[in-house]
Image: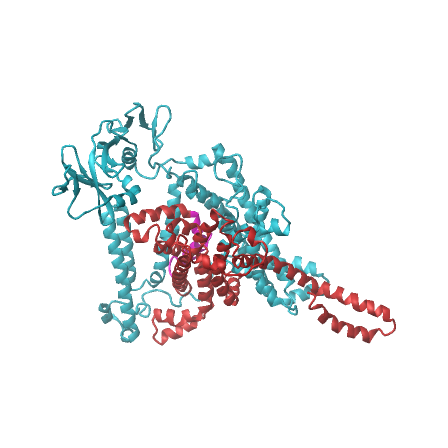
Chain colours: A red, B cyan
Amino acid sequence: MNGSAPHTAAPADQTEHGVTTTDVEYLKSLQRRRPFGVWFKDKGWRHLVGVIVTIFAVFPLLYVLSAALNSTGTLVGSNALFSKIDFGNFTALFNMPSRPFAQWFLNTMVVGGVTSAATVFLGAMAAYAFSRMRFTGRRVGLLSLLLLQMFPQLLAVVAIFLLLSGISEVIPALGLGSQLGLIMVYLGGALGVNTYLMYGFFNTVPQSLDEAAKIDGASHTQIFFGIIMRLVTPILAVVGLLSFIAISGEFVIASVVLTDPDSQTLAVGLYSFVAQQRSENWGVFAAGAVISAIPVMALFLFLQRYIVSGLTAGSVKG
Amino acid sequence: MPDTELREDTDPAASSAPADAPATSSRKTGAARRRRTGPEGIKGTIAKIVLLGLVDAVAVYVLIMLFLSQSWLALGVSAAVALVINWIYLRKGGLPAKYLAPGVLFLLVFQVFVVLFSGYIAFTNYGDGHNSTKDDAINAIQLTAQKRVPDSPAYKTAVLAKDNSFYLLFTDPQGKVSLGSTDKPLEEVSGAQKNSTGKATSLDGYRTLNFQEIVANQQSILDITVPVSANPADGTLRTADGSNAYQFKPALKYDQAADTFTDTTTGAVYRDNGKGAFAADNGETLSTGWKIDVGMENFARAFTDPSLRGPLLGVILWTFTFAIASVALTFALGLFLAITFNREDLKGKKAYRILMILPYAFPAFLTGLVWSGILNPEFGWLNQTLLGGASIGWLTDPILAKISVLVVNLWLGFPYMFLVCTGALQSLPSELDEAARMDGAGPWRVFRSIKLPLLLVSIAPLLISSFAFNFNNFNVIFMLTGGGPRFADTDRDIGATDILITLVYKVAFGQGTGRDYGLASALAIIIFIIVATVSAISFKQTKALEDVNS
């Protein structure tokens, strides 16, 4: 805020010089006060708001980073921000046999990656059908999807748990404790939220392209994979990323399905870190939090522009 | 778009899918045939055969497993699903179904079915102590309530191992040798080697554990209960030290004709009380019961049980407050920031923007945990460092905990609102602004009478989704306060910041009080009804549905 004040004041005093030349004292007072007042009323307050909100937004992130780098390890010890910088917590994090952090990280990447890839694919196929074909039940189908996305899967967590425990009696590989089972459950939510978002985007691809390809002899699969999928890459990236973020942070269903520490995801594992002894494990937890947050945040910032346009294009239509 | 284009019907183009059965090709026009025999067509056909083959292989495996476990209903449904999938992909035409089937299948099983299943569970007493059939419960009672038969002879015992599981080898007083394990009833064996005292010590195909191994595996050996026969009423054999075993019999005797349990020592009679449990005349029930339909009892209990009614009403009220306040606060701050930074010539705009959306990129489940450290009343940064050792109960005082939850959720949610409001503001035509200014409207007036109404038209659907999301915002609450501080007027684990969905989770899977799936599902159904009502009303007033009609 203070840094930009002289810049905006500079053009102002030149005009002052040109207009008034008699009263030097008056001029000086003007130079000092009015430009700042005007500047503040016009722009300065915006910087003030910006700085305050930025501190609010960034402080917890700095706090967790400082706690991760401070090997004192306890909650109290982490209060003096950046008083000590070392990597003791990170070494400790990867050397806990009962809490296999590296395995959790891998599990999260696998579950999140497979689920989001499959979600994108299933959603794109459905959106293609809704956008390019006319069939009985199309309107009802779209409406039902719109309604279904109001009811998140976690509401039915009890039924999901009982269904999977029933499945594990017959096919243990798909039941409780299996990541494959968890991925299947997540795919149940693949259509609800995403199809509608993709449907809107698919509609913006001109139908004449399909027609032209068709006349040239392309089959529907060739049109889908060769033309449509390539033109809608931005929305595919957005849906894939959003569903990766949602799945990697999902706690309720994962905590119920994955009971064995070796198969758990980061959300379930890191919660168990602090659930009982919050203050003792704090430093190591913070290190885990930093490592888990970095890939997601990097991806997010990298694809930020796409996400913003996806959020606004898919939903803000008016 | 015109309806006729690409209409799915019997025109040759639509049925020229590369994967169509070759046998049908002779009936096609020349053009269609040429297309199908191209390289793409062959590749597509092979891909389809492989994929469908894989699906069918899995389906056959599942069907065999279901057959072996004698789950006839599941078997029938799975077979029907497998047939439908094959029909969809092998028939000509029906193109939309081919694209929709995979997603819809998962949707039906893991979203629609589980909701209906929740509805069913809500009308049962499913939960700890009530999770199986009555026959299973009778067996379980007989197996668990075991007592040593007073003058049972000592069976000499050896511990054997095979394939990582333990077996007990018994020599009874008459010298008869038999073998058994927990899931393998006692069975006489021959060919066992005996030592000088006449005790059988080893058996071909099994390894005998030595003393050190017995000590090392003490707990799993103690847990072995060998049924004397397939009938649980005959009792079991158990060993306490790995060398002598005694016979145990059920302390509760089941009378099949009268459907009652009789305690063999006190003589008390336990009858089926019609509520999924055996109860004595004095009201005492056996802990293992079975699952029955209880009708509306779970719903009735939620609103009449004194330990539940008061807290539940509080929770419902707070859920609404939390969801509405979260939407209002995030929207207000997001809109304010969007207006503040909606200036082309503002220096550092980009930097502010990136820094401000960082909370949105931070994983939500970590947010609650990190803030719970900052706000921790005893050791947290806020009390210790910023407020110099104050002891303000940010997470332990009911009111302050609610405020803390809202502030943390504001931290999480304002960047999203900031982004969408910026997008919506920039899409407003600037002529409106100019025209209003010409007519003499001030900036505030322009905003309130022109920009805000236009903005709300496009943002309203997002506000509704945001409400629905926050209504079930499990992570923030559960990770930050765990629902606490607990209400004083109930012995259940319900607290001041609990919302309905955290309550469902705690009732179904919480520690302490037993799991009660029936009650949890009833609460989930209540959430369904509330969310459905709210969204039905609000969607009626927005134009969100118009898209569908195009």
Q: Residue at x 23, y 45 (%)?
A: B210
- Which residue is more in the foreground, A115 or B118? A115
Is B187 left or right of B144, judged from the image as shown?
left
Quarter residue A17 falls in: bottom right
Residue B498, magenta (yes or no)? no
Can residue A274 be seen at all in this image of the molecule?
A: yes
Q: Residue at x 24, y 41 (%)?
A: B182
* x and y percentages locating residue A144 in the rendered image: 43, 54
Q: Residue at x 37, y 54 (%)?
A: A262
Is B452 left or right of B223, judged from the image as shown?
right
Residue A139, magenta (yes or no)? yes
Quarter residue B126 falls in: top left
On screen, residue A47 above or below B169: below
Q: Main secondary structure of the magenta part?
A: helix
Can residue A250 be seen at all in this image of the molecule?
A: no
**Given the current orientation, which residue lies at the most extreme right position?**
A22
* x and y percentages locating residue B178 in the rendered image: 16, 39
* Numbered disc total: 0
On screen, residue B143 above or below B12: above
* x and y percentages locating residue B209 in the rendered image: 23, 45
**Given the current orientation, which residue lies at the most extreme front position?**
B196
Residue range in magenta is A135-155
Is B436 left or right of B424, judged from the image as shown?
right
Which quadrant is the N terminus of chain B positioned in? bottom left
- Which residue is more in the foreground, B17 or A312? A312
Is B239 left or right of B375, judged from the image as shown?
left
On screen, residue A224 above or below B101: below
* x and y percentages locating residue B298 in the rendered image: 42, 37
